[in-house]
Image (tube, rainbow, N blue to C red):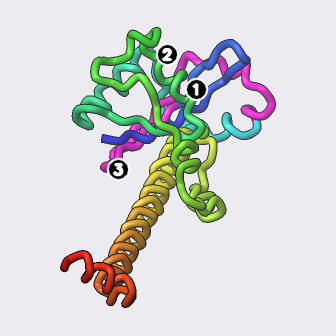
Amino acid sequence: MRIFIDCEFIEDGKTIDLMSIGLVREDGVELYLESSECDHSRANAWVQEHVLPKLRADVHRFTRKEIAAAIVAFVEDSGPAPEFWADYAAYDWVALCQLFGTMIDLPKGWPMFCRDLQQLIATCTDPDIAALAKLEGENPHNALGDARDVKLIWEALTEAARADVIAAAAAAEQLQQQAKIAELSPKPAAKRKRTATKAN
Ligand SMILES: [Mg+2]
């Protein structure tokens, strides 16, 4: 099952410290967790302004070990072969993976990579970026709000890609029909004559 993720974190060019994580499964089941181990005093001005106010005062914060265990259970419950998606996924993926240790410590059955919405956008024919931006919810920079947006945008892009495939199939069918019509059309007289001579 696809699992759409987003992380908020504090990074300094050397470390990516997980602050909060949101996960939304393809079937709509959600998980949101905040870390009790992230040092908020290290937040830069941008994070202080945009991210810290979006943390939820009403939720209990968990240790990294507890977050890791909750995520493993959440992903396990989604069935085999999880597929992770994020937007500009690189930092989110590292922040998630480091909950478990090094790259080889990832939970069994997990892929060793995360799919990126931006790669999907890059492969779409003429994606409507303005329309996609409108899908973004009213809670940017909250990990759960952003994870919900990743799901919404993935669904819109997939729908657009499906429409592209349908249009391409219709165009191919039209070409085939035209080829058939051309084949059925009477051949030029000179050509028919030559064929007849050959046959005799
Ligand atoms: Mg975010």
Mark 3 highlights which residue? 28
Q: Residue at x 38, y 39 (%)?
A: 3
Mark 2 vs ligand 1: CB under 8 Å? no
Mark 1 highlights which residue? 19
Q: Position of residue 31 (x, y in %)?
A: 40, 37
Q: Which mark is residue 62?
A: none
Q: Position of residue 72 (x, y in %)?
A: 32, 24
Amino acid type at image mark 3: Gly
Mark 2 highlights which residue? 98
Residue 82 left/right relative to 121? left
Q: Residue at x 69, y 12 (%)?
A: 14
Amino acid type at image mark 1: Met
Q: Residue at x 45, y 64 (%)?
A: 164
Quarter-of-image position of residue 127: bottom right
Span of residues in magenta? 21-48
* Label 2 residue SS: loop
Between 25 and 176, the residue placed more toward the observer is: 176
Q: Is residue 109 above or below residue 21?
A: above
Contact between labelled residues 3 and 1, with CB atoms less than 8 Å apart = no
Residue 181 left/right relative to 125? left
- The answer to whether residue 110 is magenta is no
Between 176 and 146, the residue placed more toward the observer is: 176
Q: Which label's residue is closer to the chain start, 1 or 2?
A: 1
Q: Which label's residue is closer to the chain start, 2 or 3?
A: 3
Amino acid type at image mark 2: Gln
Contact between labelled residues 2 and 1, with CB atoms less than 8 Å apart = no
Q: Which label's residue is closer to the chain start, 1 or 3?
A: 1
> On the rendering, which quadrant does ligand 1 occupy?
top right
Which mark is nearer the camera, 1 or 3? 3
